[in-house]
Image (cartoon, rainbow, N blue to C red):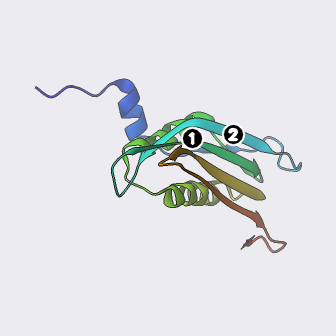
């Protein structure tokens, strides 16, 4: 008999990133979010990788809804994905969803095999509104 999924597993499986209107779009302010229990699987070995994901952004018209972000980030826990790919995928999803003035995502992965990896992806809107590195 197959075991039924628990409500948390279903919530993670169905998670989609959501944006809310920025309550202060006329003002520059920074939002910093830390997700200290990020996990994914090494695409080569299958061993678990653990990281702290740090997100910092200057919102424009939208902000990320935190519960949706938490659940969406937990979707990575069963995926075979490299540190670089995971960090860039998180960045790309947030950049597309929020269209912020500035965004920085840091994937600070726990050491494994005596190697500590930190991946940083950042971008700010150019004066024309298009992204610049």
* Percent x, y of residue 29: 85, 45
Q: Residue 79 at x, y = what percent?
A: 38, 49
Residue at the outermost left position? 1
Q: Residues within 10 Å of mark 1 (few under 14, many from 20)?
A: some
Between 106 and 58, the one lying in front of the other is 106
Q: Between 15 and 86, which is closer to the camera in this rendering?
A: 86
Q: Which residue is mark 1?
A: 69
Circle 2/circle 1 CB separation < 8 Å: yes
How far is the residue under mark 2 from the one under mark 1? Answer: 10 Å
Residue drawn at (66%, 38%), measured in percent from left and top?
A: 34
Residue 119 is left or right of residue 39, and the answer is right
Tag 2 secondary structure: strand
Kindly indicate the quadrant of the structure image that contains residue 66.
Answer: top right
Which-is-in-front pick, marks 2 and 1?
A: 2
Callout 1 secondary element: helix
Q: Quadrant of the C terminus?
A: bottom right
Q: Earlier in the sequence, mark 2 or mark 1?
A: 2
- For this orientation, the residue located farthest to the right is 27
Q: Is residue 130 above or below residue 52?
A: below
Image spot of residue 85 (x, y percent)? 50, 60
State the residue at coordinates (46%, 57%): 82
Residue at 72% x, 56% y is: 103
Task: Identify the residue at the far front of this view.
Answer: 114
What is the quadrant of the N terminus in the image? top left
Residue receiving disc 2: 33
Q: Position of residue 89 (x, y in %)?
A: 53, 58
Instruction: Name the image quarter holding residue 129.
Output: bottom right
Instruction: Give the left or right position of residue 4, taking residue 23 as reference.
Output: left
């Amino acid at each position: 008999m197959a075991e039924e999924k628990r409500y948390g597993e279903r919530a993670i499986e169905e998670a989609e990133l959501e944006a809310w209107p920025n309550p202060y779009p006329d003002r520059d302010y920074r939002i910093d979010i830390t997700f200290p229990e990020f996990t994914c699987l090494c695409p080569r070995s299958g061993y678990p990788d653990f990281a702290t994901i740090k997100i910092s952004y200057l919102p424009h018209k939208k902000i990320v809804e935190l519960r949706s972000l938490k659940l969406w980030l937990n979707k990575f826990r069963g995926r075979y994905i490299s540190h670089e790919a995971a960090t860039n995928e998180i960045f790309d999803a947030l950049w597309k969803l929020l269209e912020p003035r500035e965004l920085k995502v840091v994937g600070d992965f726990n050491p494994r095999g005596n190697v500590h990896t930190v991946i940083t992806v950042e971008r700010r809107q150019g004066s024309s509104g298009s992204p610049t590195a």
